[in-house]
Image: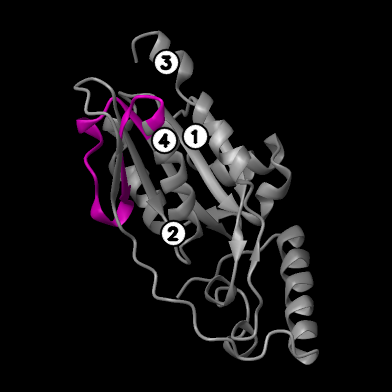
Amino acid sequence: MSVKKVSRRDFLKIGCLSTAALGLTICGVSVMAPDPPPIVLSSSTFGERRMNNRILIAYASFAGSTREVAVEIGKTLGERGFLVDVIPVLENPQVGDYQFALIGSAVYGSSWRPEAIEFVKASQIALNRVPVAFFSVCLAGLADDEAKRSIIYGTLRPIVEPVAEVLFAGKVDRRGASLFLPGWLARFFPTMDFRDWNKIRSWAQTVFVSEEANGG
């Protein structure tokens, strides 16, 4: 099994979160709460059925936070008049069936989920024929800037040149914490939700606006 490199900044974040989790456990705040419900990486459809106005939102999610963000983006785009399919990348949706594509993933160790990266690589030809936007859900999204985007999207930009990129702050619970904490400590990890739903909806209101005006 390969081990992902963790940047010093991510290491410090993980350390702070670990300390907080341990402190809350000692204080009895997070005392063996029930396990989170199983994650179902489901598909959804939103919006009006128009022949030439279809958007694919393909997402990769481990703990479910990114799936919920993808669904919220889909709802907002549907309200704008698009027909939107929100589909897990593991279902290998066909990009050629759409006029726009939005690809999103959870981020761990400053990198997308492996299945999301593989989807972009496998769909490279089709993705380069339509406007594409990237979104990421991670703690780095608490301060979205070009430096962080370059780290996360640096390996993707040579494959597909997106018309838009964004980082959204994510949610951390015991399931997500199990990726960077020992199992015994992850079990006591409190849920911390940093997602800014207004930012998510505002971004979805503006993405692809110029491409739509130019006829896609």
Q: What residue is at 21 percent from the left and 40 percent from the top?
A: 94
Q: Earlier in the sequence, mark 1 or mark 2?
A: 2
Q: Which residues are magenta?
A: 79-101
* Tag 1–tag 4 contact (CB < 8 Å): yes
* Residue closer to the observer: 202 or 58: 202
Looking at the rendering, in which quadrant would you find the C terminus? top left
Q: Residue at x 57, y 87 (%)?
A: 183
Residue 24, image quadrant: bottom right
Nearer the observer: mark 3 or 1; the answer is: 3
Determine the CA span between mark 3 and mark 4: 20 Å
Return the residue at label 3. 211
Q: Which residue is mark 2?
A: 61
Q: Amino acid at mark 1?
A: Arg
- Describe the element under mark 4 as helix, strand or loop: loop
The residue at which mark 1 appears reads as 157
Quote the CA–CA distance across marks 3 and 1.
Answer: 19 Å
Question: Residue at image x 21%, y 31%?
Answer: 96
Q: Which corner quadrant holds the N terminus?
A: bottom left
Considering the numbered disc 1 on the image, is that residue within a helix, a strand or a loop?
A: loop
Q: For residue 78, which quarter of the picture?
A: top left
Amino acid type, callout 4: Ile
Residue ID for mark 4:
159
Residue 106 in magenta stretch: no
Instruction: Mark 3 and mark 1 in contact? Answer it, CB < 8 Å.
Output: no
Please, is residue 44 above or below residue 74 in the view?
A: below
Q: Earlier in the sequence, mark 2 or mark 3?
A: 2
**Nearer-N-terminus badge (3/4):** 4
**Distance between the Cα atoms at labels 1 and 2?**
21 Å
Query: For the residue labelled by badge 3, is the local secondary structure a helix, a strand or a loop?
Result: helix
